Amino acid sequence: MATFDTKKKDFDLVVVLEAFQRCRQSDDTLVLREYLRAFTEMCRFFKLTGTLFGFVARDLEDKIRILNEHLAADEVHYVTVQSMIQHEVDHDLTKVIRGNLKSGSRTLLRLHRALEFILVFMSRLRTGEENEKSSVIASEVYNQTLSRFNTWILRKMAGVAMYMLPSKKSLIDVMCKQDYESVMRTLGEVVTSGQPLYDITQRVYEDKDLLELP
């Protein structure tokens, strides 16, 4: 069974914060490239746990790859979250595969759902006690958010992986590049910057009736 590796890692929360801040424009459009930059670093968090959350990292990497390929092929329509979704709605592309690429709207929706879990988890970490079990926090947040979108087998895999997580302070000390006090300060800024991205994206999907894309 995979265990939590206590070797020091270099997950950089500041990269996530800066990408979140640059993602949201003054008119509330969301720059897709910056959204993906934030997720690329968050994906590193799961990769750095090794085999423990390897299945999560692989899934996120695949979705980031799909959206980056859409962006590289069409920087006009895929430059923002809103322009991408509008383009795919207008051309009936939200449920289809173009060549080897799945719909950008469908792919982003999966990242959007993951973002809800990540933001609530970060918020709970920020307010929890130092010695509180991050495994308990993660499990509670997962059951409130992402679990309803996952298959039975994924829920079981996630449950086993989360069970292995250490205390809040140990998790931060091991996984993060910055020291514990710096991370605690930055967590609040990340949640404050990230929550509007989630809310704006949620409204876009609601307005287009796309929240249940298969």
Image (cartoon, helix red, strand yellow):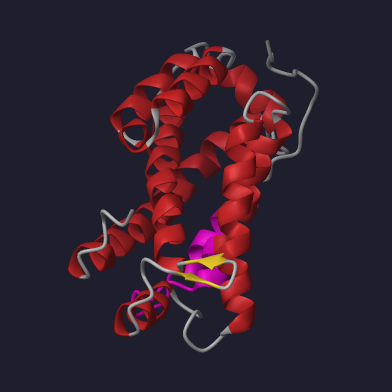
Give the x, y percent position of residue 186: 54, 44
110 or 139, nearer to the observer: 110
Magenta stretch in the rendered image: 17-35
126 relative position to 143: left or right: right
The answer to which image quadrant residue 3 occupies is top right
Tell me which residue sits at (75%, 18%) in the image.
6
28 or 106, nearer to the observer: 106
Give the x, y percent position of residue 176: 68, 35
The answer to which image quadrant residue 12 occupies is top right
- Residue furthest right in the image: 7
Give the x, y percent position of residue 20: 50, 60
Query: Is residue 13 in view?
Result: no
Q: Quarter of the image for the N terminus: give it.
A: top right
Tell me which residue sits at (61%, 34%) in the image.
55
Q: Where is 147 relative to 161, above or below?
A: below
Give the x, y percent position of residue 156: 46, 19
| Magenta stretch holds residue 21 | yes
Q: Where is 152 relative to 13, above or below?
A: above
Query: Is residue 115 in view?
Result: yes
Q: Where is 76 relative to 188, above or below?
A: below
72 or 10, nearer to the observer: 72
